[in-house]
Every structure is written in C-alpha cells, then in structure tokens.
C-alpha cells in the first residue's frame, strides 16, 4: 500500500495545485463580501489565454512562452472577472446569477475563439512544464519521495502565492480592509474605506488566481484546451467551504480533494485499489464534505456580508 501512495502522491499534488490557487482566489472574493461561483468560467478563460499565447509565441520565445503564458492567463482572468464585479458591485445584481452567467459565457466565447483560431474547439500544446526532483530534499526518508519527487515548478509558485496571500490577508492594511468589507461593510464605509474599490480589487484578484489555476491545468497534466476544466472550479468552491474560508484550511482541503480524485483516477491501474468500486472513490470527497458541513456547521461561519450587495448610505 505504501508503494501505491508513493506512486500516486506526485500526481495528487499536481491535481491539488490548480484547486488550491483557485480556492485562494475564491477566498479573496468571498472575504470581501462577493460570492464568486464563476471560478469555473474564469479557469476556462485562463486556460484558453495560456494555450493561445503558448502556441503562437513558442517559436519565438521557446520554453519561456509557457511561463509567460501563466502571467497572460492571470491578466485575462482578472479582466474577465470585471464583468462579475460590475454586475455584482456596481449594479447590485444577484451574485449567484452573475457567477453562473460568467461560467456560461466563458465556455462559449473561448470555444468559439479556439475554433476560429485552430478550426476546432481544442488547442493542443506540444510541450508542457517538465517535472524535476528537488535536490537534497528528495533524499529525505519517507517525506522526500512524497513531496519532492517529480514536482512541477508551478507547484512551488502556487505555494509561494499562498504564503503571500495569507500574509496580505492577515498582516497588511489592505487585508484588514478587505476582511472588514466582508464582515461589516457599512462600518468599514463609515471608517472611510471605499468598499466598492476594495471589492473590485478582491474580485479581480480572484479572477487572476482562477486564471492561473486554469493555465496550471493546461501546462502540467492536461496539455490541451477543450473549453472545460471538468468541474474543477466547483470543486475549488467546495474546498473553500470545507477549509472554512482560511488559507491553511483551504490548503488542507485541496490536498484532500486532490488525493481523493487521484485515487479515483488511478483505481483501475493500481492493483491495491482495484477491489474498491471506482464510483465510491469518485464520490468520496463530496460525501466527506457534506458530512463535515453537517457536523461542523455550527462552527463554520462564512463572512457575514458574503452575497449581500452594498448600498452606500443604507443601514
């Protein structure tokens, strides 16, 4: 069984990273008071931007094109999220409906553009980001083969962004303002904080990180844009709730989901897992999330103003 865990763990980490960065984006948005269920669509936009940039600029930029495409995906994700921010913040539209519209529009627009560019709805990459062993750390007994063997560079980039995001959220004035807007927006407004600007910034950060999540899927284990991320955005939302809107909680939840999903994907290839029906492994993380919400719902507290439009002057 240990050999099975060692074999699938690098794949579990690779699968967890897009979930982690997308959940972190959702955390910023919801801690500011804006529910963003459009993460799925924003991941699709990021994946498309990364694929198109990589295909067209690899001949001139070489391997640097893939890394630069991650930044392009973040920019496009942030810009596309302005649609959700404008509808939810400026127009006081229903945030769930706005996020659903983002998911629908993103898939349609990106597939149309991909079909215009390539003649089909898919964009295929010839090369992705290579794996590597972390020097010295891979030789650590037990942990070395689990965490530092055959890793992607994007893994360490995303973990660094997570640490930076936690620092910004809890140790900076901007993070304090953002959390205040998600808990007591009218009190924040009375204190001189521009709630609209803070929420716009939070939603755009959410879009940028979700775009990076979609691009990470493309350049690591997928290698092809097809207009979908197979529900990863919704799984990131589940991880956000499971992690109780906290960076470390989200980290643990996404690793759990990534490992459970990898078990399901590898169940037919690993002899130790073939005795367990595949459907049980696929629904396992969702069932655990529902049970956790049932048993710990009293201690689970979302941002108080999440989902509530802010109307200046109204108390």
Image (cartoon, helix red, strand yellow):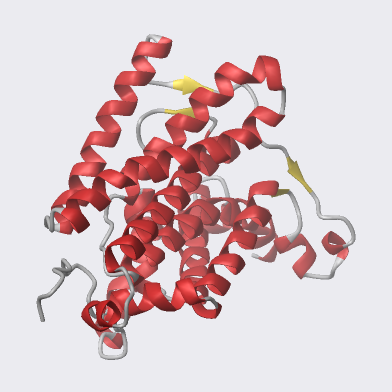
User: In this orientation, does residue 199 appear?
Assistant: yes
Using the rendered view, name the quadrant where residue 103 is placed.
Answer: top left
Query: Horizontal and vertical percent for residue 11?
Result: 60, 51
- Nearest the viewer among 160 and 181 is 181
50 lies left or right of 146: left
19 lies left or right of 103: right
Q: Residue at x 31, y 90 (%)?
A: 299
Q: Which residue is drawn at 32% across and 54% down?
A: 234
Using the rendered view, name the quadrant where residue 128 is placed.
Answer: top right
Which quarter of the image is occupied by the C terminus?
Answer: bottom left
- Reply above or below: 70 against 49: below
- Nearest the viewer among 114 and 142 is 114
> Most extreme residue toward the bottom, as rendered?
298
136 lies left or right of 294: right
Query: Horizontal and vertical percent for residue 56?
Result: 56, 17
- Reply above or below: 21 against 119: below
Query: Horizontal and vertical percent for residue 61?
Result: 70, 22
- Nearest the viewer among 123 and 260 is 123
């Amino acid at each position: 069984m240990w050999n099975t865990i060692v074999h699938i763990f690098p794949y579990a980490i690779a699968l967890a990273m897009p979930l982690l960065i997308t959940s972190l984006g959702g955390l910023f948005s919801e801690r500011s008071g804006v529910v963003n269920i459009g993460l799925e669509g924003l991941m699709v936009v990021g994946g498309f931007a990364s694929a198109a940039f990589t295909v067209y600029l690899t001949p001139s930029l070489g391997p640097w094109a893939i890394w630069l495409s991650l930044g392009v995906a973040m920019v496009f994700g942030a810009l596309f999220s302005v649609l959700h921010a404008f509808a939810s913040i400026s127009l006081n539209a229903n945030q769930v409906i706005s996020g659903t519209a983002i998911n629908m529009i993103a898939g349609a627009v990106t597939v149309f553009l991909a079909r215009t560019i390539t003649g089909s709805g898919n964009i295929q990459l010839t090369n992705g980001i290579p794996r590597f062993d972390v020097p010295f750390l891979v030789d650590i007994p037990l942990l070395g083969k689990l965490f530092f063997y055959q890793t992607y560079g994007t893994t360490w980039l995303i973990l660094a962004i997570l640490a930076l995001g936690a620092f910004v959220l809890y140790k900076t004035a901007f993070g304090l303002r953002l959390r205040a807007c998600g808990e007591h927006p009218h009190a924040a407004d009375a204190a001189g904080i521009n709630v609209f600007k803070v929420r716009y910034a939070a939603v755009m950060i959410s879009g940028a990180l979700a775009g990076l999540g979609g691009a990470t899927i493309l350049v690591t284990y997928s290698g092809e844009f097809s207009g979908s991320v197979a529900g990863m955005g919704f799984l990131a939302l589940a991880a956000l709730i499971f992690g109780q809107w906290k960076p470390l909680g989200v980290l643990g939840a996404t690793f759990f989901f990534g490992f459970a999903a990898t078990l399901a994907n590898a169940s037919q290839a690993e002899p130790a897992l073939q005795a367990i029906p595949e459907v049980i492994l696929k629904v396992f993380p969702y069932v655990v999330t529902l049970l956790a919400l049932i048993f710990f719902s009293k201690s689970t507290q979302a941002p108080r103003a999440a989902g509530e439009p802010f109307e200046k002057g109204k108390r």
